[in-house]
Image: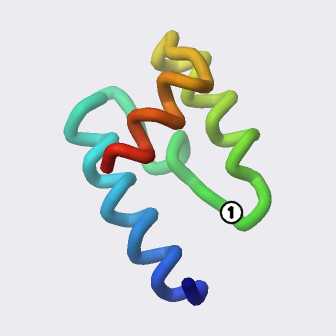
C-alpha cells in the first residue's frame, strides 16, 4: 500500500469514527506516520475505550 492509499484509507476511517463518536475533533484524529500508538492513547482517554477495543473497531471499518 502506498502513502496515498494509506492516507485515503485513514480519511475514510476518520470519517466513520467522527460519525460514531461525535465529540471527536480533527485534532484528536491527527495521524502521522509512526504515531499510531500516541493517537490511540489520546482516543483511549477521550472515549474511555481500551486499546484492544479501538484496534478492533478500526479494523472493522
Tell me what residue is drawn at x 51 percent, y 10 percent.
48
Q: Residue 1's x, y, as percent?
A: 55, 84
Question: 14 or 52, which is in the foreground?
Answer: 52
Mark 1, Cα crowd under 10 Å, few <14 / some 14-19 / many 20+, is few
Question: 30 or 54, which is in the foreground?
Answer: 54
Tell me what residue is drawn at x 45 percent, y 63 percent.
10
Tell me what residue is drawn at x 24 percent, y 32 percent.
20
Seen in the picture, residue 5 relative to 42 is either above or below; the reply is below
Q: Residue 41's x, y, as percent?
A: 68, 29
Q: Residue 2's x, y, as percent?
A: 58, 89
Q: Secondary structure at mark 1?
A: loop
Question: 58 or 21, which is in the foreground?
Answer: 58
Q: Residue 51's x, y, as percent?
A: 61, 25
Tell me what residue is drawn at x 57 percent, y 25 percent.
52
Residue that sits furthest to the left in the current view: 19
Q: Is residue 37 left or right of residue 27?
A: right
Residue matched to label 1? 32
Residue that sits furthest to the right in the current view: 34
Amino acid at each position: 500500500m502506498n502513502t496515498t492509499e494509506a492516507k485515503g484509507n485513514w480519511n475514510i476511517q476518520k470519517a466513520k469514527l467522527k460519525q460514531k463518536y461525535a465529540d471527536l475533533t480533527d485534532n484528536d484524529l491527527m495521524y502521522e506516520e509512526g504515531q499510531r500508538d500516541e493517537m490511540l492513547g489520546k482516543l483511549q482517554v477521550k472515549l474511555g475505550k481500551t486499546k484492544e477495543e479501538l484496534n478492533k473497531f478500526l479494523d472493522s471499518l
